[in-house]
Amino acid sequence: MKTSILLILMMVLSLGASAQFHVLKEEIEVKPPIFMGTAVSVVDNGASLDDFVAQRMIYPEQDLKLHREGTEVIQFTVNTNGTLSDFEVVNSVSPNMDAELIRVLQLTNGMWRPGSNNDGHTEMRSELAIACKIRLYEGSDRQTDFQKVATKYFQKGSKLLYTKNHPRRALSNFDEGIRYLPYDANLLVMRGYARYALGDLAGAIEDWEIVKEKTDIDNLKEIAGNYHDLEGYAELLAEFEK
């Protein structure tokens, strides 16, 4: 049986790419870093980081054998000289996948036009999210539906938390769902509840902060409120709002 690999590059986000900071009524224009695809001094046309990663990434052999899939999210700093540093794995498919994607990202050193504000070039955080999928048959379009898989884990974890009172087993299922959809608000909110039930207040707040950051505080409260009958809802919300 032949196995082929399908890599879907989801997004490259510059954290704060559209941010504006107000200083004494004067706006500072902030521009995110741009991937150029080759040495910046040679080419001035933006290239696709998606294509660059997809062409150079080698799916880890162990992950292929185990059919290990998911959405890898890595944050990094684009320095003023166009190099990358401070890699942080935000969502991991596997340790081998972490290492492979960081290896490929390191190949882009010198290929970035750094971010800038009114004072000139500045370091800025960026993020790569890549959905790693494996095709079972050469030439087949069949692939894993990440939404469907994540929903299954969400439903199973919610049942364990709601009706079985097994927060640890629930947490395991939410972790698996988040491996596929790392920024799904419902999964993050429920994992926050499970973490809180296990005494991990910092972890619970961290999950809720992600929902707040990716959407807004009103959306977080609305989603969390859907599960207000869970034990600890009022206490966790109060801790989060401190």
Image (spheres, rainbow, N blue to C red):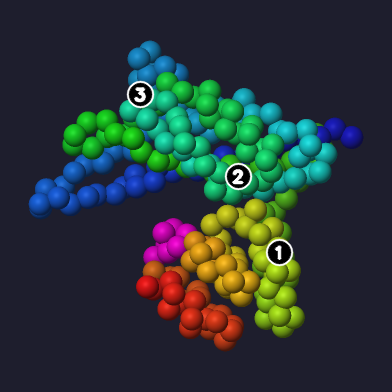
Most common secondary structure along the magenta stretch: helix
Cα–Cα span, label 2 and label 3: 26 Å
Tag of residue 235? none
65 left or right of 39?
Answer: right
Element at badge 1? helix
Dots 1, 3 in contact, CB < 8 A = no
Q: Are marks 2 and 3 in contact (CB under 8 Å)?
A: no
Q: Is residue 240 left or right of residue 233?
A: left
- What's under tag 1, amino acid-wise? Asn
Q: Quadrant of the N terminus?
A: top right
Name the residue beneath numbered marker 3: 81
Q: Which residue shows up at 46% across the image and 32% down it?
A: 85
Q: List the single residue furthest toward the bottom.
A: 229
Nearest to viewer (mark 2 / mark 3): 3
Q: Position of residue 138 (x, y in %)?
A: 80, 34
In this rendering, is residue 103 above or below 161?
Answer: above
Name the quadrant containing residue 98: top right
Marked residue nearer the N-terminal end (2 or 1):
2
Name above or below for residue 49 compared with residue 107: below
Residue at figure coordinates x 66%, y 38% from the top left? 97
Amino acid type indicated by mark 2: Glu
Label 2 with label 1: CB-CB less than 8 Å: no
Label 1 neighbourhood size at 10 Å, few (<14), some (14-19), many (20+)?
many
Residue 23: x percent and y percent?
14, 50
Which residue is located at x 48 percent, y 81 percent? 235
**Magenta residues (range):** 208-216
Type of the residue with mark 3: Asn
Q: Nearer the viewer, residue 137 or 181?
A: 181
User: Disc 2 marks which residue?
Assistant: 72
As helix, strand or loop, the secondary structure at mark 3 comes to: loop
Of 67 and 4, which appears nearest the observer?
67
List the residue tagged with mark 1. 173
